[in-house]
Image (cartoon, rainbow, N blue to C red):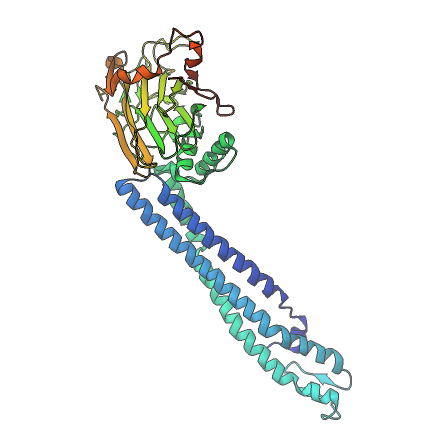
Amino acid sequence: MPTPLDVLKWDVSGYATTATNATQIADAIVKASGTMHATILDLLWQGTARQSAEAKADAEQTQMRAIATAYDDLATACAGAASTMADPIATIKSIILNYVHPPVSIGDDWSIEGVEDWNSEAGVQLSRLAGLASTLFAADAEWGAKIAAANSELEAMAPANALAAANAVIQADKKNDTRADPERIRTSAAAFQQVFGRLPTTATDWSTAEVLNPNSFDPKYKDHDARIVVGRINPVPGQGTVRTALYIPAAEVTNFPAYDLGDNRSENANFDPEHARVTMYVDYENGIIVARQNPSVTVHGDVDVATPKVEAQQLHDGSVLVRYDATNPFAPGAPVGPEISGHTVNGELVLAPTSGNPGTSRITAGGLIGDYPSVEIYQDNSAGKGRPVLIDAADSGSQWGPLANLPFHHEVGGGTAMFDPFKADFSQPDWMKNAPTKLGSPASPPSIVVVNK
């Protein structure tokens, strides 16, 4: 049992502060869990990957809310302790300090000696000590147990060994899916903010933020950044984002003097912008074109990257023509200056909105592209996430594909007829105003020319 001297040292004012802090932590956790859960569900997961992501997001939200509940329990216990113990402690201190003077003394067992008149004011006040102490110790036992239980609950949810295990799982997840890496999410948001002056908020924003992120997180790239060029277009609300990936399906492909690593995958509506040689996004909601070239890697681990040469035009109806030319820096005869080697990933694609209600319009695509590599184009809007627009497999998905197919081209979708509206009118003296605009730095993206037709 605490002695009178012990009680004189007690101060429960900190309980109120702890209660306030615990409540704020609980509120922050609930808010963060909701935001994280919504963000995961808004990502372009598909199929089993989506099911796994949603299950994990649900489990993590449940766990975070359980932790928030534990903090709420701690807040309730601390607030209860503060409110029920503060008055008895204050009264006990006041009585001892005012009335325990020689010949009156108080023992460690709260017994009182030396009182001459128990009916005096001093005697009446001193007689209250036993009841006050009993009330105080009962409150201390009740709320102390609840505080201990809340702390044990929190500790059980995140003991040292559990934190170590959780960190191991996080690291494994980062290896298996670098898109879930918090650092990657953070740098994607910063890349988006550099271009738009604000942080991403919508699913469309986050998709564009991801392709704008120049950092490479796949270990094979050895921290070599991707090269990114950007241009601004007139927004066409409701069209969403059109994502294009040019990827090598094989794990390795022929090159001289060494083999190069491919992307080792098939078509994927939820492709990672890192898992392609070149990715191009037309974000109609935010009015931007982004072209990204990922580093090339040899089987010996050499890494290098070149900047893609991309230019674009736009029609008044929102249609966009994109011409692209990307060079593998390890290809024989790869250009050092402005000259272009014959063995490049190049082509011309038109993306054309169709009439329809905003959000349900379906983009059509067409043009002239190389026989290699594989090309996939998807549209993300309210009509569906990852809706296929154009899928064109490489003529050869084998290791010999680049050598045999890169120099050759074929029409896709609506074909070269889709180029006609973009052609400059050479009879007009200002025809150069219709010349394509080269995409530039994300720090100062140029505005894409709108063809006057």
**Count of number-bearing discs:** 0
Q: Position of residue 293 (x, y in %)?
A: 39, 22
Image vertical order of residue 149 relative to residue 293, above or below? below
- Tell me the quadrant of the picture where the C terminus can be found: top left
Percent position (x, y) of residue 291?
40, 24
Q: Is residue 403 visible?
A: yes
Residues 159 and 336: in front is 336
Residue 370 in view, yes or no: no
Specify whether 146 is left or right of 15: left
Front-lying residue, 332 or 194:
194
In the image, taking residue 411 as reference, residue 1 lies left or right, namely right
Name the residue rendered at 47%, 33% in the picture: 192
Q: Position of residue 450 (x, y in %)?
A: 42, 20
Identify which residue is drawn at 52% across, 64% down: 75
- Closer-to-camera residue (390/86): 390
Tell me: residue 5, above or below residue 439: below
Q: Position of residue 433 (x, y in %)?
A: 44, 13
Choose top left, top right, bottom left or bottom right for residue 262.
Answer: top left
Looking at the image, which residue is at 43% across and 51% down?
A: 33
Q: Quadrant of the N terminus?
A: bottom right
In which quadrant of the rendered view does residue 11 lie?
bottom right
The residue at the point 36 percent across, 40 percent down is 43
Residue 375 sits in quarter: top left
Q: Is residue 257 left or right of residue 395?
A: right
Q: Nearer the viewer, residue 107 or 339?
A: 339
In the picture shown, does residue 76 fall above or below 121?
above
In the rendered image, the vertical position of residue 181 relative to residue 16, given as above or below: above
